[in-house]
């Protein structure tokens, strides 16, 4: 009985195992049949066949018969009759001479047929062998009348180009030059549109000296060998966007009358646009120049856009002329770029560009409106250089804000110092400090959105809703800069632009911090106005010269104009004329220096007047109001060291006579009864201000009113500050001393 039970169980287990295997096999068969059925109902494209209804047609080999068929039945493309040779494999190699000769002969006859201007569409085709596009145009020599088959507009375009070439020919002859050959003085007219979208040329392409009267579209085309478009005339827009040129490209002496688009083009070898002309906008954005790019002597009548361009080799813009804006936004220059003798009439934008080598602006001409915007420029002076005419290049550099550009300005200063262009380095330093002054002024006087009340936020132009949104957002996290207003979607872009000049964002200033910031701003403003932050010797010289003249006049006035009664102590008319004339000449020299060197001369004069006029004028007013009733009224307040007469450098000199009695034998009152006596007052002012003079003139020590002593001591104190500022300026403007200090 146990044996039978065991056998029964074993048979059941076998039957279950067999049933499971059969079930698994059946399941796999069902899955396979389902997959086959699913694939059977799929479109043919899933099996690698040509999709139906997608517009993708396989390329056909062009035969003489197929060529004749396409020539006899042009198609309408955008309303223009066009010879349709799209998606063709066109063999124009020498071993296929029969098709090649027939191709040029028949196609030329069709394109030049009177009464119409059919276009040519070679899009998505492969051209094997050299493509002589010049053979498809109609020859038009410079001499003679225009052909009657042209429209009036086409004739006017041709006449204009002929006049231009005739003038160039006459100029070439006058200069005994052979630059313009007879071949270049002949044109080939291509009347209809030319489309080369995604066309692949395996051989050389020749469209030299061809006048295209209709648009040229060559987007995404690939040129394996040399492409010659030199001397071309593009009357309508020409687009070579996303094209690839694997060998050298020639566009020299070409004229683009309409927009030219070369964006996203890759030039693997040298490209030449020398002596070309762009009448309107030229777009070279996102272009890759892997070899030399020659844009010398090019005339840019419209905007030139080289944004995000990348240069792996040298780019030359020598002697080019830019009448409109030039953009190099976010461009990368790995090799030198040259603008020698170029002419800029509008701003040049290098915002966000990266310079890894040398940019040369030597002998370039910048119009008054031309500026080099270098905001966010990546520039390392250890491996890169910005070169330009000394004293000129730094004045056209433009940086609107200091934030984010501190390192750039420091690198530019180092760049010009290493080039020994001290004036340019100082100009960049002045620009940096001026931006710092503006930044301090914004902290002092602009509204800080992190602590401003709702009323203040509304006063600067925000709505109630926007002000409340800012208040809620700053409770969660204070704003670090104004751009966070946009990132947090608190305000819109127009409101942000309006707020940039009225508000700031950052840590609020305490009362003590506000005072320190105000003093820093005031001292920096004085340095900028009186010496351009130590970068202009001419300005500090003019300031000192004018101050010496003013105090010389004050000293003469307080010493010679004493009283009218009971008996007058006054200068004579001759002395008065000499003093006033000398003061006028000295003041004129100082004013001339200030107006020639100061950026804001009137503000500089206002600051100087605030330092030199209020206190001295107040002292003089008190002196004349109180009157003078002391002894020695008929003797000058000033004495001179009569032991020697020579030019002296009196560094440690004080404005009062020593108290030692024997010095009274050396110091005697200056003479009033000499015609040249008035010179002593200007000499005293020079001594007191610069510690330099011909005589050591000081205050006497007996019967001296305190107000007069205060006037002299006040100028002496200003002179100490002036000498410090003068020496600092000299250390920054003398090349040898400058190099010694900084290196």
Image: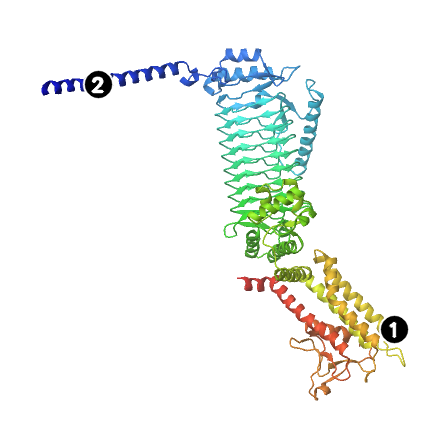
Which residue is outermost to the front?
1
Q: Mark 2: which secondary structure?
A: helix
Checking the image for residue 573, the label placed there is 1
Between marks 2 and 1 in the image, the one whose residue lies nearer the viewer:
2
Q: Residue at x 33, y 17 (%)?
A: 31
Q: Position of residue 674 (x, y in %)?
A: 82, 79
Dot 2 or dot 1, earlier in sequence: 2
Measured from the top left, where is residue 230 in percent x and y?
A: 58, 30
Q: Which residue is painted at 54% across and 11% down in the image?
A: 69
Structural distance between the alpha carbons of marks 2 and 1: 141 Å
Residue 499 location, x and y as percent? 66, 46
Above or below, comparing residue 573 to residue 413 in the picture = below
> Where is residue 522, by image quadrant?
bottom right
Farthest residue toward the right?
Answer: 566
**Looking at the image, is 708 positioned above or below residue 470?**
below
Q: Residue at x 45, y 19 (%)?
A: 95
Q: Is residue 162 left or right of residue 334?
A: right
Q: Secondary structure at mark 1?
A: helix
636 vs 12: above or below? below
For disc 2, the marked residue is 16
């Amino acid at each position: 009985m146990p044996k039978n039970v065991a056998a029964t169980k074993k048979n059941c287990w076998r039957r279950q195992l067999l049933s499971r295997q059969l079930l698994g096999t059946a399941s796999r068969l069902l899955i396979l049949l389902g997959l086959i059925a699913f694939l059977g109902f799929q479109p043919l494209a899933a099996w690698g066949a040509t999709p139906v209804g997608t517009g993708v047609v396989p390329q056909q080999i062009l035969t003489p018969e197929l060529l004749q068929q396409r020539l006899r039945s042009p198609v309408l493309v955008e309303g223009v009759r066009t010879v349709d040779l799209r998606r063709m494999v066109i063999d124009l190699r020498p071993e296929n001479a029969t098709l090649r000769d027939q191709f040029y002969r028949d196609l030329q006859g069709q394109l030049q047929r009177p009464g119409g201007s059919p276009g040519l569409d070679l899009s998505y085709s492969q051209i094997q062998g050299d493509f002589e596009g010049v053979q498809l145009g109609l020859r038009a020599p410079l001499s003679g009348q225009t052909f009657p088959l042209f429209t009036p507009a086409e004739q006017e375009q041709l006449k204009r180009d002929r006049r231009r070439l005739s003038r160039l020919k006459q100029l070439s002859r006058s200069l005994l030059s052979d630059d313009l050959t007879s071949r270049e003085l002949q044109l080939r007219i291509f009347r209809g549109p030319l489309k080369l979208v995604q066309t692949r040329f395996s051989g050389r392409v020749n469209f030299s000296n061809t006048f295209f009267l209709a648009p040229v579209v060559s987007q995404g085309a690939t040129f394996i060998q040399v492409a010659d478009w030199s001397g071309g005339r593009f009357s309508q827009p020409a687009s070579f966007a996303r094209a690839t040129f694997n060998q050298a490209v020639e566009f020299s002496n070409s004229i683009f009358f309409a927009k030219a688009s070369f964006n996203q083009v890759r030039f693997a070898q040298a490209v030449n646009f020398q002596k070309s002309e762009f009448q309107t906008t030229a777009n070279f954005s996102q272009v890759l120049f892997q070899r030399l790019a020659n844009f010398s002597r090019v005339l840019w009548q419209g905007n030139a856009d080289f944004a995000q361009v990348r240069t792996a080799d040298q780019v030359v813009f020598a002697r080019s002329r830019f009448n409109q804006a030039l953009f190099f936004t976010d461009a990368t220059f790995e090799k030198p770029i040259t603008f020698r003798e170029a002419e800029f009439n509008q701003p040049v934008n290098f915002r966000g560009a990266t310079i890894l080598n040398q940019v040369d602006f030597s002998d370039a001409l910048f119009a008054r409106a031309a500026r080099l915007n270098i905001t966010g420029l990546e520039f390392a002076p250890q491996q890169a250089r910005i070169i330009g005419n000394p004293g000129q290049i730094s004045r056209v550099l433009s940086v609107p804000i200091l934030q984010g550009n501190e390192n750039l300005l420091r690198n530019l200063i180092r760049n010009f110092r290493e080039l020994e262009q001290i004036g340019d380095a100082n100009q960049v330093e002045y620009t940096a400090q001026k931006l710092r002054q503006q930044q301090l002024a914004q902290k002092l006087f602009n509204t800080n959105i992190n602590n401003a009340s709702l009323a203040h936020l509304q006063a600067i132009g925000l709505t109630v809703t926007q002000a409340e949104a800012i208040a809620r957002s700053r409770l969660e996290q204070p704003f670090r800069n104004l751009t966070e207003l946009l990132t947090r979607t608190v305000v819109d872009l127009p409101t942000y632009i309006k707020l940039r000049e009225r508000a700031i964002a950052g840590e609020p200033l305490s009362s003590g911090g506000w005072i320190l910031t105000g003093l820093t701003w005031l001292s920096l403003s004085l340095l900028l106005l009186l010496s351009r932050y130590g970068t202009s010797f001419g300005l500090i010289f003019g300031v000192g010269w004018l101050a010496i003249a003013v105090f010389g006049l004050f000293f003469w006035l307080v010493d010679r104009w004493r009283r009218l009664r009971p008996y007058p102590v006054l200068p004579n008319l001759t002395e008065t004329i000499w003093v006033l004339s000398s003061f006028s000449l000295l003041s004129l020299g100082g004013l001339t220096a200030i107006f020639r060197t100061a950026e804001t001369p009137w503000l500089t004069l206002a600051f100087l007047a605030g330092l030199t006029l209020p206190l001295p004028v107040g002292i003089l007013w008190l002196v004349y109001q109180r009157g003078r009733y002391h002894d020695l009224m008929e003797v000058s307040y000033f004495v001179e060291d009569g032991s020697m007469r020579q030019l002296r450098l009196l560094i440690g000199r004080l404005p009062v006579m020593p108290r030692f009695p024997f010095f009274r034998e050396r110091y005697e009152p200056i003479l009033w009864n000499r015609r040249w006596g008035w010179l002593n007052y200007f000499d005293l002012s020079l001594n007191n201000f610069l510690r330099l003079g011909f005589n050591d003139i000081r205050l006497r020590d007996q019967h001296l009113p305190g107000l007069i002593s205060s006037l002299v001591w006040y100028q002496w104190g200003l002179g100490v500050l002036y000498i410090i500022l003068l020496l600092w300026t000299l250390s920054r403007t003398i090349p040898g001393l400058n190099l010694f200090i900084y290196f």
